[in-house]
């Protein structure tokens, strides 16, 4: 049985607009369902029309009535017509007022209102759901571009975006009312909003006959282009138009009346500023069709017209058109396409039976799929799920090891795809470096991101600045973790900035469950390429990290040989679990091949340990046999490394055969893999081989060094040669290119192998570990 909740539905002011009417219906239906719902209105504003009739018999309260007397009235700011003094004051005053009115949850309508509910949440810990009919920057661009406010856009837009981002990420859930703003919300704020279309109360029975005039109703202002309606009827002789609804500004109403006179249409246009639901039914009965002049993110008035049995004409792609079908329930011309509007209306005048048919279709659909009862049932489900999520444990993810502003390594990409699939189990907080944060910011699932940035040394690859960068991150990361405890911690790498904060937080809060990820162990500096002193320091830092990681509750390794290596280093076998990486197999395998074709492809960081300086001598031998053979190198690194690699290409005269492509977005990289012949795995040390799995998913056979990873992880779909043996490496490539049957056999094996590493399987293994922990 569903728990009965105390729910506050919050709006900024009371008037006959779509937001307010929707909020009122939500309160009514929630109370019918047995909840204790109340309409919370931030401010009491005076309009030419008294809208108090809207809340008759509806539980409601005006917060501004409880404010100190200087703040009980509001002043509209010049230029900022969407903003008033109480929009600014309410975030400071409302938490005190609602402190004595306990709610289980608030449902907040609109950006400016959400600023207040966010403040209530921070002060009183009352959770809230944000409903965003229109993002604030969309309102600015569509409504205020031709006003004086546009001169302040460079200042106003970033502030508005940051405020909107803040309250969206504090909300338990974000709701939008149509698909219109989904991409914007998703791209800008990296969350997946829930779509909840508005509802309507439908007629029980349709009238048998209708009138022949045009009807348009809603909340009016100059920016909604009501004058477009006059341009329409100017071209349709003798037709009558009723424009019904409240006007935000008396000045706008006067402007419209004067425009009607200027068009010489006073005898044919009736303006109604106040009407009841019964009067609206009468208007609809006497009308032939409902017309709306302006694109809407939803368009509640059109849905209401449909519920009254009228065919609807509203601009194409308006939110309400997602519920209806063009030419079946009405017509959806392009915005401002007056020729199409006029032609469609004339068609309905000539064929009134068609208007009746379309109107009946619209009425039937609204009764079936768009009632307020259905809307609120869905809202209740959203509320239940959001409140359930509130009580989920929190996992703190540390990802502070990414030091340089180039492409992420495979190890940096492990947790984000799994976290995205575990949102039903956990709330996630990610503590990440500034330069390592973009992939988290663009990951579409609910999470809190704490970015640790610093300007000094932030992108300096030299050893001492890099070490100082690590020290700074360890200090800030530790401070954050000891001041924000969580049930679970996940350290993304065995690099010190990830390990030290987790170790200290575990020491301070032993009940916090620490999951430590170990990617791979670097060899002795005597057996490792690169600067000897740097390798000595790196090995020392690794030994410190491993000593600290022994205190973790669970240690995840990427492969079995690494698990055995840790056991040999006196790690407890009971703590170690092998959970590899993963790939989006379905997404990769359906990628369309690129037009540009390479015979060989390398993907990875441009670093000595990745064997990048072996690529040129390998390809030189391939070119001897096949002078037109092309090698593509995808990846980024330091400027010095890139320069050295270019010098080697020049030295071997391979400028026409080898291309350094730098960082390439995943989708483009997969397309290039799809059109290539062979993947080159020249790593001298590696933990798993994410790029290998991605290449295999694209059907690429792999030629690689035998460093243990390919055999331990993949088993099939590759050929190996001894490490550093560039001659054997080249010969393996040449043989594969010539032997088509062998290439096809390896290609099929590679794809079959890669399919086993889809993230859904990897996540299930990780989820099983977490589930066992939760049961203890």
Image (cartoon, grey):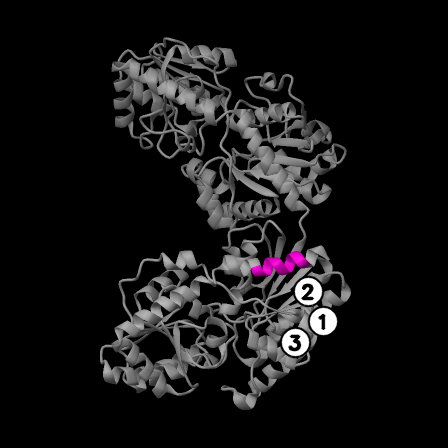
Q: In the picture provided, is 575 more to the left or to the right than 588?
A: right
> Who is closer to the viewer here, 731 or 251?
731
Disc 1 to disc 3: CB gap under 8 Å: no
The mark nearer the N terminus, 2 or 1, is: 2
Other-residue count near label 3 (Cα within 10 Å), few / some / many at <14 / 14–19 / ≥20: many
> Who is closer to the viewer here, 462 or 67?
462
Disc 3 is placed on an element classified as helix
Q: Quadrant of residue 736?
A: bottom left
The residue that disc 3 covers is 545
Residue at the location (70% across, 57% down)? 487
Name the spot of residue 510 as percent of width and height, x first. 76, 64
Question: Measured along the vertical axis of the image, is residue 73 above or below residue 601?
Answer: above
Other-residue count near label 2 (Cα within 10 Å), few / some / many at <14 / 14–19 / ≥20: many
Q: Quadrant of residue 744?
A: bottom left
Q: Kindly report the distance in space between the C-alpha atoms of the residues bearing marks 2 and 1.
A: 8 Å
The residue that disc 2 covers is 514
Q: Quadrant of residue 704?
A: bottom left
The residue that disc 1 covers is 551
The mark nearer the N terminus, 3 or 2, is: 2
> Who is closer to the viewer here, 316 or 520?
520
Question: Measured along the vertical axis of the image, is residue 302 above or below residue 753?
Answer: above
Q: Can residue 185 be seen from the camera position used here?
A: yes
Residue 325 - label? none
Disc 1 is placed on an element classified as loop
Q: Kindly report the distance in space between the C-alpha atoms of the residues bearing marks 1 and 3.
A: 10 Å
Looking at this rendering, what residue extends furthest in the left direction? 627
Q: Kindly report the distance in space between the C-alpha atoms of the residues bearing marks 3 and 2.
A: 14 Å
> Who is closer to the viewer here, 571 or 141?
571
Residue 487 colored magenta? no
Quarter holding the C terminus is bottom right
Residue at the location (25% across, 77% down)? 738
Disc 2 to disc 1: CB gap under 8 Å: yes
């Amino acid at each position: 049985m569903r728990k009965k909740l105390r729910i506050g539905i919050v709006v900024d002011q009371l008037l006959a607009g779509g937001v307010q009417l929707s909020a009122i219906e939500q309160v009514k239906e929630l109370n019918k369902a047995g909840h204790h719902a109340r309409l919370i209105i931030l401010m009491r504003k005076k309009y030419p029309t008294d809208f108090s009739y809207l809340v008759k018999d509806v539980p409601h309260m005006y917060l501004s009535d409880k404010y100190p007397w200087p703040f009980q009235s509001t002043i509209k700011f010049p230029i900022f017509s969407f903003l008033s003094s109480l929009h600014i004051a309410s975030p400071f005053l409302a938490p005190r007022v609602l402190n004595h009115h306990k709610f289980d949850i608030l449902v907040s309508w609109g950006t400016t209102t959400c600023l207040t509910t966010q403040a209530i949440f921070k002060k009183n810990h009352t959770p809230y759901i944000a409903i965003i009919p229109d993002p604030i920057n969309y309102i600015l661009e569509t409504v205020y571009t031709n006003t004086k406010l546009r001169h302040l856009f460079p200042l106003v837009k970033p502030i508005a975006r940051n405020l909107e981002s803040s309250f969206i990420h504090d909300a338990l859930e974000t709701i939008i009312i149509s698909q219109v703003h989904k991409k914007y919300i998703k791209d800008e704020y990296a969350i997946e909003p829930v779509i909840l279309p508005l509802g309507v109360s439908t007629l029980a029975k349709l009238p048998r006959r209708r009138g022949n005039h045009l009807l348009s109703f809603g909340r009016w202002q100059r920016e909604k282009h009501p004058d477009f309606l006059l341009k329409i009827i100017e071209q349709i002789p003798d037709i009558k138009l009723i424009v019904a609804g409240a006007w935000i500004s008396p000045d706008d109403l006067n402007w419209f009346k004067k425009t009607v006179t200027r068009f010489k249409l006073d005898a044919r246009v009736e303006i109604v500023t106040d009407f009841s639901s019964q009067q609206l039914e009468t208007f609809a009965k006497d009308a032939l069709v409902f017309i709306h002049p302006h694109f809407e993110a939803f368009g509640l008035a059109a849905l209401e017209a449909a519920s009254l049995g009228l065919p609807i004409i509203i601009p194409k792609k308006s939110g309400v058109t997602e519920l209806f079908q063009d030419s079946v329930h009405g017509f959806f011309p392009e915005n401002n396409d007056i020729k199409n509007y006029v032609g469609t209306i004339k068609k309905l005048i000539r064929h009134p039976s068609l208007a009746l048919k379309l109107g009946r279709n619209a009425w039937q659909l609204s009764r079936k799929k768009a009632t307020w009862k259905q809307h609120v049932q869905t809202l209740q489900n959203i509320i239940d799920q959001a409140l359930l999520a509130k009580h989920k444990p929190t996992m703190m993810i540390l990802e502070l090891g990414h030091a340089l502003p180039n492409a992420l390594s495979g190890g940096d990409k492990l947790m984000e795809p799994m976290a995205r699939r575990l949102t039903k189990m956990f709330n996630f907080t990610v503590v990440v470096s500034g330069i390592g944060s973009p992939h988290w910011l663009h990951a579409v699932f609910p999470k809190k991101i704490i970015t640790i940035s610093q300007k000094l040394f932030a992108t300096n690859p030299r050893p001492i600045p890099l070490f100082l960068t690590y020290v700074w991150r360890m200090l800030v990361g530790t401070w954050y973790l000891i001041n924000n405890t969580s049930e679970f911690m996940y350290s993304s790498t065995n690099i010190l900035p990830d390990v030290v904060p987790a170790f200290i937080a575990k020491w301070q809060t032993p009940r916090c469950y620490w999951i430590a990820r170990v990617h791979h162990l670097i060899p002795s500096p005597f057996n490792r390429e690169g600067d000897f002193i740097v390798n000595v320091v790196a090995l020392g830092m690794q030994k410190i990290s491993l000593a600290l990681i022994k205190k973790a509750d669970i240690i995840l390794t990427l492969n079995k040989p690494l698990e055995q290596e840790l056991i040999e280093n006196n790690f407890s076998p009971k703590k170690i679990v092998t959970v590899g990486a993963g790939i989006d197999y379905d997404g990769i395998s359906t990628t369309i091949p690129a037009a540009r074709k390479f015979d060989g492809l390398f993907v990875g960081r441009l670093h000595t340990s990745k064997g990048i300086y072996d690529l040129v001598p390998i390809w030189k031998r391939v070119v001897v046999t096949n002078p037109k053979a092309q090698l593509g190198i995808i990846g980024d690194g330091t400027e010095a490394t890139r320069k050295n690699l270019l010098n080697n290409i020049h030295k071997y005269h391979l400028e026409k055969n080898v291309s350094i492509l730098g960082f390439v977005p995943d989708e483009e990289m997969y397309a290039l893999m799809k059109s290539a012949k062979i993947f080159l795995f020249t790593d001298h040390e590696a933990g798993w081989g994410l790029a290998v799995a991605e290449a295999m998913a694209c059907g690429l056979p792999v030629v690689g060094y035998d460093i243990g990873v390919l055999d331990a992880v993949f088993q099939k779909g590759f050929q190996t040669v001894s490490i550093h043996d560039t001659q054997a490496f080249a010969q393996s490539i040449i043989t594969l290119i010539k032997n088509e049957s062998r290439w096809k056999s390896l290609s099929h094996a590679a794809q079959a192998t890669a399919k086993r590493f889809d993230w859904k399987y990897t996540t299930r293994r990780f989820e099983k570990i977490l589930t066992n922990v939760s049961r203890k």
